[in-house]
Amino acid sequence: MKKTFQNIEGTFDILPEAVDGAAMRRSEAWQYVEETIRAVMRRFAYEEIRTPILEPTELIARGVGQLTDIVSKEMFAFERGDTNYVLRPEVTAPVMRAYLQHHLGQRGGVQKLYYMGPCFRAERPQKGRYRQFHQFGAEVIGADDARADAEVIALMVVVYRALGLEDTVLRINTLGDEHSRPRYKEALQAYFEPHQEALSDTSRERLTRNPLRILDTKDEKERRLLDGAPRLIDFIDEESRNHYEALKAWLGSLDLDFVEDPFLVRGLDYYSRTAFELESPHIGAQSSLAGGGRYDLLAEEVGSKQRVPAVGFAAGLERLFLALDAQGIDLPATPPLDAFLIALGDEAVQWVFPAAHRLREAGLRVGYDLRGRSMKAQMRAANRQNARYVVIVAQDELEAGQAQVKNMGTSEQVPVAFDALTAYLNERKA
Ligand code: HAM
């Protein structure tokens, strides 16, 4: 016997019918969620951008930051010839690459872009954390104004609301400019240095490389230590502080609730000023539904001669599904078939095959049986696909030039002339 295969751990199939586990929700549910997201993006006047799955490794390394977990541990990168490729772990750096490469700024005005698609990170798979996952997100490129920050945050929140998720928690913070962070890093190092014994291995490693990430800790003992730690806000430059105040005021003008979290630093290096995350209280340890912030320095980091102010967010579709599941939110069921055509006998098969095609061309959703099965089996297939009408054709019907049409809801059955069938079904379409 030949070897059989399974999908790689941390990836999953999206099937027509749900299998256990929210990430494997049925494809129809994915389509519904994706369409809802697109509709909200359109309402906010964002345009779609699609960038390749493969990007130059160096773009991600420089953009996201060498010292981040994403770049130092989680990249699916490989070499072919003298090019180094990476399966994109996120989309912000690729969007900025495309913006610069195609001079999108020359289209005039601020570029408001959105995207949706797979990303890859070699993390330890667990609930809400996968190796291939799907992000949707939006980037506003070319605006300094704090309204841009408030708008992407509002857009993010509205997507969840549009799907029925109301009780998300928005946390915000400011990281200051490129000068605030190094000064804060030093202060943190100086503070933690004498407390090294109390730190976990991970935090001790972070202390030298990236001390800000210690603020992310979930460890109780470390959290208590944080109480006495220097606070980022005390190191923030005045302009960033004003920007932060403006952001809070704009969010207030939209009646958007938020929690200020001085320990929110995010795991990517390109942020300056605004950082934010959206959480769900219902999805367990990986509680972050979405996150983002301002990244005014990224463009120059990836080769731009000019500073390009920008802000955006990205969200995980799998975590969105987890939250929908946890709250018992039902997504619309698969739409029913308008009709299922049942053929009894060879001649009827000759008639049904092109008839189904004509009905489909006329805009109806139509099924029929491909295996020449019994009447009972064909009825079962019609039921399974939720057909609203069944059209039965056997020898008698062929001779009379009319089909028996059964309404599956009422069980009422009437004869309908072949040439009136399209109109009959069209009038009764769902
Ligand atoms: P991020 O926080 O790394 O940010 O990812 C955003 C979202 O992607 C997370 O909140 C989570 O829902 C989802 N996500 C990340 N990793 C995984 C995973 N392994 N499995 C499942 N879901 C995952 C960014 O990627 C930034 N590019 C966001 C951004 C856009 N900043 C500015 N613009």
Image (cartoon, helix red, strand yellow):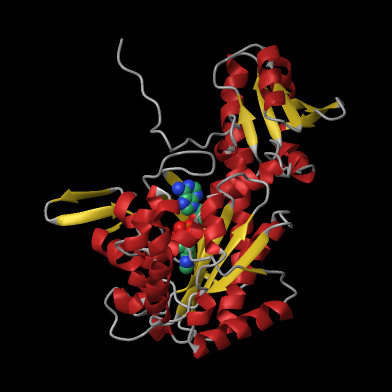
Compared with 353, 419 (above or below) is below
Give x and y (percent) for residue 40: 64, 64
Q: Residue at x 73, y 42 (%)?
A: 330
Q: Quadrant of residue 153?
A: bottom right
- Extreme residue in the left direction: 81
Left or right: 267 with respect to 356? Answer: left
Q: Residue at x 72, y 30 (%)?
A: 386
Residue at 43 percent across and 38 percent down: it is 11
Q: Front-most of 396 and 36?
A: 36
- Horizontal arrangement in the rendering, residue 340 relative to residue 24 (left or right): right
Taking depth in this image into account, of 179 and 289 the one nearest to the observer is 179
How many numbered circles are shown? 0
Q: Quadrant of the C terminus?
A: top right
Question: In the rendered image, which quarter is residue 122 located in?
Answer: top left
Can residue 401 be seen in the rendering of this structure? no
**Residue 364, above or below 207:** above
- 55 shown above or below 251: above
Residue 165, how many percent across, how many down? 71, 54
In the displayed structure, 140 sits above or below 88; it is: below
Q: Is residue 11 left or right of residue 372?
A: left
Between residues 284 and 78, which one lies in front from this camera angle? 284
Please give left or right for residue 411 compared with residue 29 in the image.
right
Q: Position of residue 427 (x, y in %)?
A: 79, 45
Res 15 quadrant in image? top right
